[in-house]
Image: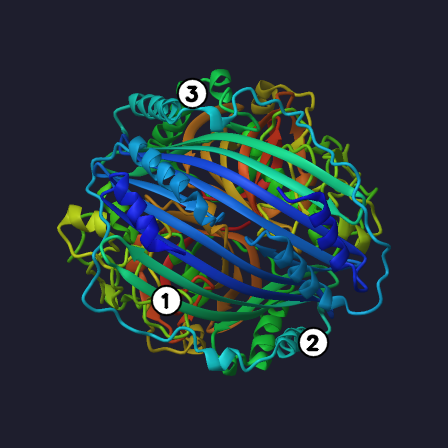
Amino acid sequence: MLAKQTLEKVINEALESQADFAEVFVEKTVQNSIAMQSGKIENAVTNEKFGVGVRVAKKHNAVYGYTNDADEASLVSLAKKLATSFEGNRVRETIKLPEMKSGNKHTVKRNPSDVDAKEKTSIVKNADAAARAYSEEIKQVNVSYLDSVQDVWIASSEDIYTNDQRVRTRLGVASVAKNDKDMQMGFNGPGASKGFEFYDEIDVDAAAKEASRIAVTMLHADEAPSETIPVVVDNGFGGVIFHEACGHSLEATSVAKNASVFSGKKGEKIGSELVTAIDDGTIDNAWGSQNFDDEGRPQQRRVLIKNGVLNTYMVDYLNGKRMNEASTGSSRRESYRYAPTSRMTNTYIDNGESTFEEIIAATDYGLYAKKMGGGSVQPSTGDFNFAVMEGYMIRNGKIAEPVKGATLVGTGKDALQKIDMVGNNLLRAQGMCGSLSGSIPTDVGQPTIRISNITVGGRKGSA
Amino acid sequence: MNFEQLFKKAKEKNIEAIQAELSEAESLNFHVFNGEMDKHQIADTKKLKLKAIVNGKMGKFVTEDIDESKMDNWIDALLDSAKAVESEDEVFIYEGDSEYKDIDLFNESKLNKLSHEDKIQLVHDLEQKTKALDERIQISQSFYGESSSIVTLKNSKGLNLQKRVKNAVIGGDVVARNSDDSRNAFDFIQSNDPADFDLDSLAHNIVSRATALLGAKSLKSGRYDILLENRASASLLTGYLGMFKAENVQKGMSKLAGKVGQSVANEQISMIENPFMEKSSKSGGFDDEGVATQYKKVIDQGKLITFFYDLKTAKKDNHAPTGNAFGGGISPTNFYIENGKDDVEKLIETMDEGLFVTSLQGIHSGTNAVSGDFSLQASGFLIKNGKIERPIALFTVAGNYLDLLNSVSTLGNDLKFSMNYIGSPTLKIDSMVVSGE
C-alpha cells in the first residue's frame, strides 16, 4: 500500500493544471481458480494483480493512466503527463486527504487465502461427482472454482480516502448431456461476497445437479417455435431481462450522453405500474455488493423505477457533472486497468402480488422461460436479445413440453410496459456484466413475471 | 528480469522444467464525443506468466507484481499449483522449433511518423466528418487506440524468443435519429500503417450504415433466403471457433469430431488461418508454448483438413502441434473464410426475395458452441426483385452453423475482419428460419 503523503503528492501534482479533479486508485488482487475437466483437476492457478490508476479531469472530461510501477517518482511523472492535457493555471487549492475510511460490512468468516488448496479442490470434486451422477446422459462436466480478494485504496481531490476489501467466491458447473441425436448444455453458477464459509451455506451437490438437470431436460426438448406470444420469465436469473433491457439504459454512462432511450425521462412513466425496480449495492454479502464504490463513495440502495415511474438513474461522479446530478455511488470498474463509470450492482424487480401458480394458470398459450442464458442490448435503441437456457410451452394454463433454442428479442421500453403480472417470489442470481469499465460481478433478480407478448425466435418456425 | 536466476532457483526446488513469458505493453487511447475529447488513456504494464513441470504435472502462476525479490514465493506458488493438478495428460515445456518465420509487426517508422497531436487530430477529424455527412447524425463518437508490446518467452530448455507488435485502430460510433426511430452504427480500421486510415470512406460507411436502417420494422415470420453480410458472418464464426479446437474435439464437445478428411461445408468454402498477416496484432512467428505458427487451410473446398492444436492435444492425437496455444488454451490467430468472386451488389441483384442481414447480436448467448445451433437477433434489409425494399430489425435468424456452411450457395469478394481478426466475405445462404411478427 502507498503512503498517504505519496497519494497526496500524486493528486497535487495532477492538479498543477486547470484540472479540477484528481484521483488515485491502488489495487492488489489475488485470485485463485481451479478448473476440473473430464473428472480430473486440470489447472489450479494463482493470479496476482497489482497496479495503480490515476485519473485527472476538468469538468467531465477525463484523462486516465495506469501502471504496475508503483514507486512515487513514476506515479508523479504519470500525474504530470496526464495533467498536460489541461495546461494552465492551477484552479484547486492544495489537497489534504482526510482520515482513511474503511470497514467491511460484508463479514467474511474464512478468508480464502487461509484455506488449504485440498479443501478447495474437494468442493470441486464433490460438484463434479454430483453433476455426473445425475444421469447417464451427462457426458461432460466442467467445474470452475474461483475465489478473489481485491484490496483497493481510493484517494481523490473530493475529500475522499477509503480502503475497501472485496472478498468473492463462486462455483460454476457446466454439464453437457449427449445422445446420438444432440448435445445440450446446462450451467449453474452460485456466488457471493463471502469467503470459504459460502460452501457451508449452500448445497454444493444440489447446485451441481441443477446444471445437469437443465442439460438433460434440454436434450429431450423440441425446437422452440418462432412467433410473438406471452412469455412467463421465472424468478432468479430471469432478471437478466431487466438488467439488459432497462438497467444498462439507466446507467449515466449512456444517459449523460443522451444516448439512452431513457435520457430525460426522470419522473415519467416508463413501464407498467406493476414494476418497481431496485439497484442495491449494500445487500449483505451479495455478489454485486461493495462497501464503497470505485470512486470511494459509500455504496447505496437506489430505487430506479417506482410503480412504473423513473425515479433515479445510476450516476458516477463525472457523468453526474454532465447531467448536473450528484453521484449515486454507482461508479465501478473491473480493475485499475479501467477508468470507472456508472454500473449496476445487485439489480432486481421487486416483489408483486401474484403467485407463480396464478401466473401460469392465467396464461392460455405462451412460453415459460424457466432459466435464462445471457443477452445483450444496444442502449441507444434499447433493442435487446437474450437466450432461454431452459424453456417450456404453456398450454391451457399448464406447463407443457420443454423447448430449446429460443431467443427473446424486443426493446426495453416496450417490454417494460408489457409486464402484466408480477409474482411474489423474488430471487437473485449471480452473473458477470461486461461494459466500458470491464467485467464486474453483478446480481440480477426478479420474481416470476409475465410479458404480455414478445418475439420468440426458435428454429421450429411458426405454427 | 533475471530469467537465469529464476530457472536456477527452480532447479534447486526439483522443478523439471520452467517457462517464463514476460509481456511489456504500452497503450494510448483517445475518445471524442460530440466534438470534445472526453477520454484519454495511457498505460504502461507488465505481466509475468510462469509455468513449471513438477512430478509430471503443470503448475501455473501469473503476477503483475514483478518484484524479483519475491522469486522464491513465485516458485512456491508453482509447486502448490502443480500439486493440486490431477490430470494425467502429458504436459510439455518445449525445446523449440528449428525455424521461426520472422515478420515485422512493429512497422516502427510508420506509426511513429504521427505525433501525439496528429493522432488527436485524426480522432477529431473522423468525428467531424461523420457529423457533417448527415443531419440525422445526433450523436457521434470516435476513438483511436494504439498499443505496442514486447513479449519475451524463455524456458529452462533453452527456448529464447521475442516478438514486438505495434498496432492501432481508429473507429467511430454514431446514432442517427429521425422523428420516430434511432439507429446506431459502428466501424473501424485496424492497421500499423497510418496510410490505411482513409477517414472519408470510414465516415461514409458509419453514417450510411446508421441512416439506412432508420425506420426499420420487423417482418413476417417464415423461411427466407439470406445474404449474410461479411461482418455479420465473421461475428457468427467467432461463436463457433470452439468447434475447430482439438481440446473440444477430444472431449466430445465438437460436432466436427471424426470428420477430418470429410466434407463439412459447401465446396465453395475454404477457411484459412494465416499467422503472417503483416498488419495484424494477432500475427506472430510462435505461440505461447514456443511452437512455430503456420499458415494452414482448416477447411479446403468444403473438406475439413485439420483442427487447431497445442502440444498436449497434438500428442494425444499423434498429430504435429499447429502453433495455436494462446491465452491459456487453444485459439487461432487470423482466421477467415476465403473470398468468393461476386460483388455484393451482384448478390443483391440476383436475389428474388430474401434478407440482407447486416448485423447479428448476442453471439455469446445465442449460439450453442457444442450443438452448432443458433438463434440470433438480426437487422438488415428486405430484398425484393433484386432491390432493397426496406430496412428491417427486431427479428431473429435461427439455424445450425454446420447446416449453414453446407447451404452457402455463393460467396462475395468482400472479406472483412472483426476487431479480433476473424474474417468472412458476404455469404448467400439458402432458406433459414426467421422469426418476426
Front residue of A375/A165: it is A165
Amino acid on which disc 3 is placed: Val
The x, y position of residue B358, in whole percent, is 50, 64
Between the C-alphas of marks 1 and 2, the distance is 37 Å
The x, y position of residue B355, in whole percent, is 47, 63
Q: Circle 2 is placed at which residue position?
A: B128
In the image, residue A370 sits, relative to residue B406, either above or below, namely above
Circle 2 SS class: helix
Circle 1 SS class: strand
Going from N to C along the chain, the mark reached first, 1 or 2, is 2
Pointers 3 and 1 in contact (C-beta within 8 Å): no
In the image, residue B60 sits, relative to residue A176, either above or below, namely below
Front residue of A37/B105: it is B105
Tell me which residue sits at (43%, 58%) in the image. B23
Check the residue under mark 3 and report the chain it is in: A
Label 1: few (<14), some (14–19) or many (≥20) C-alpha neighbours in 10 Å: some
Q: Circle 3 is placed at which residue position?
A: A204
Considering the image in quadrants, where does the N terminus of chain B appear? bottom left
Report the mark closest to the observer, 2 or 3: 3
Amino acid on which disc 1 is placed: Lys
Residue B163 is labelled as: 1
Check the residue under mark 2 and report the chain it is in: B
Tell me which residue sits at (62%, 36%) in the image. A452
A152 displayed left or right of B402:
right
Q: Residue furthest left?
A: B318
In the image, residue B402 sits, relative to residue A153, either above or below, namely below
Tell me which residue sits at (36%, 35%) in the image. A35
A81 displayed left or right of A404:
right
Residue A188 is labelled as: none
